[in-house]
Amino acid sequence: MVKVAIVGCNGKMGYFVADAVEKREDCETVFGIDAFGVNKHEFPVYKSFGEAAEKPDVIIDFSNPSALDDMLGYALKSKIPCVICTTGYSSEQISQIKEAAKEIAVFYSGNMSLGINLLIALSKQAAKLLGSSFDIEIIEKHHNQKVDAPSGTALMLADAISDSLEETPQYVYDRHTYRKKRSKNEIGIHAVRGGTIVGEHEVIFAGHDEVVTLTHQAQSREVFAVGAVNAAVFLADRDAGMYDMSDMLSAVLQ
């Protein structure tokens, strides 16, 4: 039985994660962490890890970048693996996560959906075949409450595509300040915020007289929660290091 601690347990994603854990027989939630500390669950909820008496086997984080220090401090001290699903980290915080992975197992992904990770794999293949002669644009759409833009998933897509190109491209986030034609060596990244859109990502390869489009739509946040719990069970007995969805999928397919 894998014992799970949920950071951001009172947020929307926190509830989905708690529900996903409850539906499984191989894991259980031992406590939650939330900045407001309000207990709306059957398990205890604390404002910080310093208040927790229970010890989890793995931590799932769907919260806010501001919670990173407390979580990593506790995880490093107690040698507990972390599944980090929060987005919007600064470059310094990402370096902090990578440094922590030298001592503990860290599963870090901007998107826990199986479908999104398939989209990333397909985009990499398309970039290898089309990238030198096709313009590449990424459009992401999310609900009007999402704070960070572009989304972590859009950046995951851009980075994966960039790794597949012969030349490192420039990321262009906003064209209204540009008074020039689009260069070949760039990837346009555009964010849309509105309504209750869960998450949509589209990769456009625009060539001469033809366009190839790859698209993924998330119909519910539940898909991300299920993916995070799968990652937690996968990570519980892993050695220190950085892990992502490709590692988990490879383990399943073996």
Image (cartoon, helix red, strand yellow):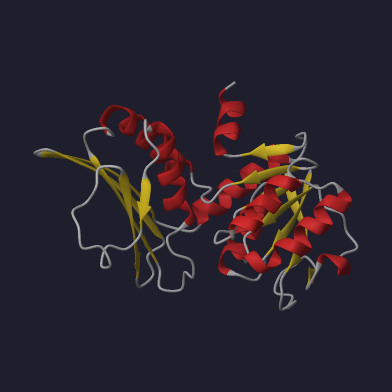
Q: For this rendering, which residue is in front, 159 or 87?
A: 159
Quarter containing the N terminus? top right
Give the image location of residue 219, x and y in percent: 39, 56
Give the image location of residue 41, x and y in percent: 71, 69
Q: Is residue 82 above or below residue 51?
A: above
Q: Is residue 132 above or below residue 152?
A: above
Q: Quadrant of residue 31?
A: bottom right
Q: Residue at x 48, y 41 (%)?
A: 114
Quarter containing the C terminus? top right
Count of marks overlaid on the render: 0
Q: Residue at x 55, y 34 (%)?
A: 246
Q: Among all residues in the image, which is located at the extreme top?
A: 254
Give the image location of residue 11, x and y in percent: 60, 70
Question: On the picture, is 115 further left or further right than 32?
Answer: left
Q: For this rendering, which residue is in front, 80 or 113?
A: 80
Q: Is residue 148 above or below residue 186?
A: below
Q: Among all residues in the image, which is located at the extreme left?
A: 209
Q: For this rendering, which residue is in front, 159 or 67?
A: 159
Q: Is residue 141 above or below residue 123?
A: below
Give the image location of residue 245, x and y in percent: 56, 38
Q: Residue at x 42, y 52 (%)?
A: 154
Q: Among all residues in the image, which is located at the extreme right?
A: 53
Q: For this rendering, which residue is in front, 25 or 145?
A: 145
